[in-house]
Image (cartoon, rainbow, N blue to C red):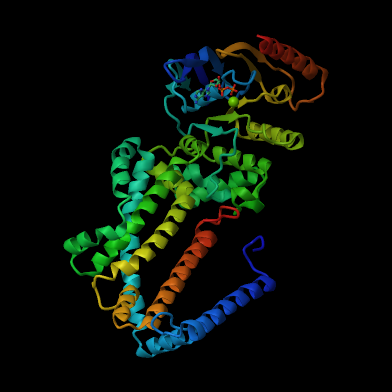
Amino acid sequence: MGEVKVSGISVAFEKEEGESTLALDNVDLEIKDKEFVCFIGPSGCGKTTLLRTIAGLEMPDKGQITLDGGDITIPDSTRGMVFQEYSLFPWRTVIQNITFGPQMKGISKNKTLEVAEKYLKLVGLEQFRNSYPYELSGGMRQRVAIARALANEPKVLLMDEPFGALDAQTRNTLQKELLQVWAKYQITIVFVTHSVDEAVFLADKIVVMSARPGRIKKVINVDLPRPRERTSSEANELRNQLLKMLAEERRN
Amino acid sequence: MSKHGTKGPRERGIELLSVTMAIVLWQLVADLVVNNKFILPSFTDVLFAFIRIIEGGILFTDLAISLLHFGIGILSALLIGIPIGVAMGWFKIVNRALDPLIEIIRPIPPLAWIPFAIVWFGLTHTSAGFVVFVGAVFPVIINTFDGFKSVPKVYVEAAKVLGCMSSGSLIRYVALPSALPSIASGIRISMGVGWMCLVAAEMFGVSTNGLGYKIWWHYYLHQMDFVLVYMLILGFLGLFIDRLFRWYVDGQLLKWRAGVVV
Ligand SMILES: Nc1ncnc2c1ncn2[C@@H]1O[C@H](COP(=O)(O)OP(=O)(O)O)[C@@H](O)[C@H]1O
Ligand SMILES: [Mg+2]
C-alpha cells in the first residue's frame, strides 16, 4: 500500500529579520495507492517543497501528512526520492550506489547485491555496473538514481523534475521506461514537472498549483487510455487546458 | 606538462639538461670561485661524503629514526586531528567551542613548543614526534573541517531518504567519503610541514641518530659537505614521501574523482 494523505499543510521559510516566505498554504491532497500523480505549476510555487515535506525532509508548520494512516515526520525508506540535481554518491560505483539503501537496512551483503543486480538490470545498465558516476551521461545517472530508490522497495516514489536536465529524446525514453517500471512494481509515484507534455503523458492525476503562497489550484483526473499517444486529440485538448491555467497563474 | 601528467621525451630532456647544468655550475663556482670546502662544498665533495656515509652503514639507522619521529608526529596528528575536524564540521556547537582555542594556538610556531616537548616527554623519540605533531595537526583539522562543511546537502538528503539516519552513519557513509579529497590534501600539507619540523625536532638531542640530528652533528665538526648530503637526503625523501602519498591517494583512494589534483 502507498496511500498518501496531505491535510492542511503549511510550510514557511524564515528569511532574514523575522520575515518569512509562505511556500505552502493550507494544502490538502489525497494520493491513492498505485496512483501516478504529477505536480505542475509555475516555478517557485512550492512543488519541491510539497514533495520534500512528503519525503520528511521538510517539517510542516501546520497540518499533517500520513502514509497508509501513519504519520510522516522524518525521512525513511518507505518513501524513495529521485532528486532534480544529480545525487548519486560520486565515491561509489553504480552498483554500490544501488546497494546503499539495502546496506543501511542491515541486509546481508549477498542479498543486498542480489537486489541491486535486479534493479541494475531493470534500468539496463549492467555494463556500467562498476563505473563511477562521473563516467555516466545525465540520463544514465538518473536511471541509476531510480534504481537506487527502487532497491529500497519504497511504497511511494517521489521524483522532483528528474528528467528536467535531459535532452528531449532521452527524456521521452526515460518517461516510457518509468511507466514500465510503475506498471511492473505497482507503486505510487509522485512526480514534479514543469512540462505540460510530461504531465499529460505520465499522470493519472495532475495537480495544478498556484504561486505564492503555494496552493492547489485544481486537480485533474486524466483518463486517457494507456499506452498513451502523445499526439492524440484528447491529449492535445488536455494540454491546451493546462497551458491556459498556467498562463493564468503567470499573469497573477 | 601534457594532459595526464606524463612527460614526453622532449620534456624529460629539458629537465635532465637543467639539472645537469645546475650541477656543472655548482661544481665550477665551488672549485673556481669560492674554493673553500667549508663555505661551499662542491658536487664531488658531496658525492664523496655520500659514499663515505654509505660505507659507514649508518644511513639506514638515521633514516629509520627520522621516519620514526615523523611517523609518531603524523600518525598522532591524524588520530587527533581528523576526529576534531569531523566533530567541528558536523556539530555546530563543537565548532563554536573549539574554534577560538584553535585560532589562538595555531599561530604559535611549532618550534616554540620544543621546551615544553622536553619538559613533558623528556629527551625521547616521543618528544621529537610531538614537535612534528604540533606542526602537522592544524592542517589536518582545518581541511577535515572544510571538507565536512562543504559536503553537498543533496548527498546527505539522498542518504536520509535511503534510510541512513543517525549522525554516526551519515558521517561514516556520506560526509567522510565526500570530504576525503579535502582531508587528503590536508594530510599532504601536514606531511610537508611535519617534515620541515623534523630537523629542529632532532636538534635538541633526543637521539644520536636521525637525518636532522646529523646535520647539526656534522656542522659542529665543520663538515659542511656532510651537512649538505643530509640536507639533500631530507629533500629527496620529502619529495618521495609526497609522491608516494599522491600516487596512493589519486590512484587508489580517489579513483572516483575524474582528473583529481590533491
Ligand atoms: N530552503 C529554503 N529556504 C528559503 N526559502 C525557500 C527554501 N526552499 C524553498 N523556498 C522558497 O519557497 C518557495 C517555493 O519553492 P519550491 O518549493 O522550490 O518551488 P518549485 O519547486 O515549485 O519551483 C519559493 O519562493 C522559494 O524561494
Ligand atoms: Mg523545484
* Quadrant of picture, ligand 2: top right
Estimate the x, y position of residue B220 in percent, counting from the top left. Answer: 29, 80
Q: Would residue A139 appear left or right of A49 to someone viewing this image?
A: right
Estimate the x, y position of residue B138 in percent, counting from the top left. Answer: 35, 52
- Answer yes or no: is residue A223 visible: yes
Name the residue located 47 percent from the left edge and 64 percent from the top edge.
B245
Estimate the x, y position of residue A217 in percent, counting from the top left. Answer: 62, 10
Q: Would residue B164 appear left or right of A114 to someone viewing this image?
A: left
Of the pair B99 and B151, the residue shown nearer to us: B99
Of the pair A191 and B76, the residue shown nearer to us: B76
Vertical side of B20 occupied by A37: above or below: above
Vertical side of B213 occupied by A62: above or below: above
The quadrant of the rendering that contains the C terminus of chain A is top right
Q: In terms of image quadrants, where is residue A143?
A: top right
Name the residue located 52 percent from the left edge and 79 percent from the top edge.
B26
Name the residue located 51 percent from the left edge and 81 percent from the top edge.
B29
